Amino acid sequence: MKILRIKLRNLNSLRGEHVVDFTKEPLASASIFAITGPTGAGKSTLLDAMTLALYGRAARYEKDSNPENMMSRHTSECSAEVTFSVNKEVYRAEWQLRRARGKIDGALQPPQRFLYDAQETPLNRLSTEFNQLIEKNTILTYINNLN
């Protein structure tokens, strides 16, 4: 599996929309790169975005049953999206979390998860189908070894 693009909105300390596109320069021609920055800059949030989009979980919140901690404070929605390729097939995985009525104090709604093919055709109708599709298309599963 090759990660092509990470897009996130209102995750942890990264408010607003942020995109890391590995298909554009300078990352497209980089054979290796480092994710650096001061504490709180969002390095771990990039990794959270990938695992949220692919598996609906973030390792640092594994023991926390309240997913609202992933959402930036004073926002009513957040999302994580990863575009990736496997065997020349391109997919986009998306995870969304919202509060009721778009209000920052609204009740937390269940997360929504979607998988799309290269033509933006949805591959799942229900969030419950998502895990099987990801495992089938990537041959990868989520394993938390932080315990």
Image (spheres, rainbow, N blue to C red):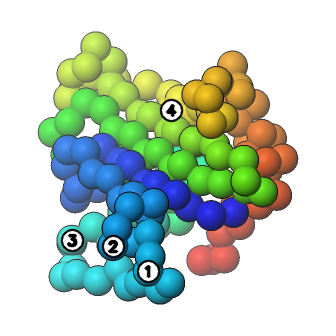
Q: Residues within 10 Å of mark 1 (few under 14, many from 20)?
A: few
Number of marks present in the image shown: 4
Real-space CA distance between mark 1 and mark 3, rounded to the nearest whole angstrom = 22 Å
- Earlier sequence position, callout 4 versus callout 2: 2
Q: Which residue matches tag 1?
A: 30
Q: Which residue matches tag 2?
A: 26
User: Amino acid under label 3?
Assistant: Ala
Q: Is residue 76 in view?
A: yes
Q: In which quarter of the image is residue 3?
A: bottom right
Real-space CA distance between mark 2 and mark 1, rounded to the nearest whole angstrom = 7 Å
Label 2 close to label 1 by CB (< 8 Å): yes
Image disc number at residue 41? 3
Residue 111 position in % (x across, y down):
50, 32
Along the line of sight, which residue is nearer the eye, 63 or 130? 130
Residue 117 position in % (x across, y down):
66, 34
Q: Quadrant of residue 144?
A: bottom right
Real-space CA distance between mark 1 and mark 4, rounded to the nearest whole angstrom = 34 Å
Mark 4 falls on what kind of element? loop
Real-space CA distance between mark 4 and mark 2, rounded to the nearest whole angstrom = 33 Å
Real-space CA distance between mark 4 and mark 3, rounded to the nearest whole angstrom = 25 Å
Q: Which residue matches tag 4?
A: 111
Q: In this view, does 107 lie to the left or right of 15?
A: right
| Tag nearer the camera, 1 or 4 | 1
User: Amino acid under label 2?
Assistant: Pro
